[in-house]
Image: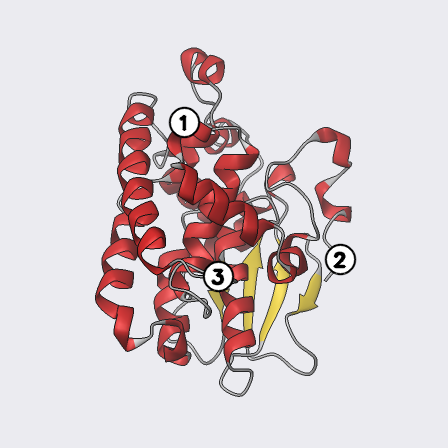
Amino acid sequence: MAGEHGSLEHGGADYTLHYFPFSLYSIMARFALKLGRQLNSDNAPRVELKFVNLHVHDNLSEEYLTTVNSRGQVPSLTSPLLPAALGDSQKIAEWLCEKQPELVPAAHKIVIERLMEKLYSFHFKALNIPPEAAANGIPNVAAAMLERGNITEKHRRALEIKSVLTIETEHISQVEAHVTEFMEELGGIIGQHKSVGSRWIFGQQPTILDGYAAALGIRLLDNKRLELLPLSVQEYAIAVQQSEEWKSVTHGRSTVYSTSMGPAAGLDPK
């Protein structure tokens, strides 16, 4: 499996985050790790980054499917310190909040947990599919790879699992409705806590919800899906997008890949 290594901090790392720089879920996890380190560097976990190139299907390799994530997804967090790999960004968020409770301040705990659950009640990948692509059917790369004759039985079994985890086109409108409802509630919360000079949802201090909701808002901005974002959420997402915290994770790039950027493998300095 091809990969590049880096770290979120100087020194050795205890954990490895397998990621792709244009994967929304990867961006969420990376941004949350950045905000946690900013809040408290003393208890922030030491995390190494490992690039997984989705453009050449590193995530469908035998090594990745059998040792990192059987669903072929990013991000994933691995470590000898974990009983098992954390195979999705929601589990990574829960793990990070246990390590850094500052990300879930008591005054806003109930609201944060409710919105984080809502945020994971739908799959954002459906929002990345252009209408014309959905109309023509969504390619199933794992199923296509099963047609090859030169794969091991272990790899074949892993690909069979991945091949059934596809997005159905009829789910796209349902996801749009869920996102609209989520963003309307988020906009109301932002309005309640907005103050002069504040950037984050609850004022001056970021939370785990900022790490994840801001990334989704910015992805929707980049995809020009403004109809899904109330004005207050648009303003919030733009403010976060202009922040040094965000730029340190995305290097000022769009969250949406374009071929004009060049090969993805050469775009992500640590």
Work out whether mark 3 precedes mark 1 in sequence or the reverse, and give the earlier one: 3
Local SS, label 2: loop
Identify the residue position indicated by label 1 in the image: 227
Mark 1 burial class by Cα count in 10 Å: few <14, some 14-19, many 20+: few
Q: Secondary structure at mark 1?
A: helix
Of residue 112 and residue 5, the one placed in the foreground of this image is 112
Relative height, residue 68 to residue 236 (above, below): below
Near mark 3 (Cα within 10 A), the count class, few <14, some 14-19 or many ≥20, is: few
Q: Position of residue 35 (x, y in %)?
A: 52, 68
The residue carrying mark 3 is 196
Percent x, y for residue 201? Answer: 40, 58
Q: Earlier in the sequence, mark 3 or mark 2?
A: 3
If the image is split into quadrants, where does the C terminus sit? bottom right
Q: What type is the residue that disc 3 sits on?
A: Val
Query: Cα distance, mark 1 to mark 2?
Result: 33 Å
Inspect this view and state whether residue 249 appears.
yes
Whether residue 69 is visible, yes or no, is no
**Residue type at numbered disc 1:** Glu
Q: Position of residue 28 (x, y in %)?
A: 48, 55
Q: Quadrant of residue 16?
A: bottom right
Please state which amino acid type lies under the numbered disc 2. Answer: Pro
Q: Is residue 211 above or below residue 134?
A: below
Q: Is residue 131 above or below residue 26?
A: above
- Residue furthest out toward the bottom: 42
Q: Mark 1 or mark 2: name the one nearer the start of the chain.
A: 1
Residue beneath the point at 48% across and 12% down: 132
What residue do we see at 32% from left, 37% from top? 179
Q: Which mark is residue 118?
A: none
159 relative to 226, above or below:
below
Residue at the (51%, 82%) spot, across then down: 40
Which residue is tagged 2? 269
Give the foreground label among 1 and 2: 1
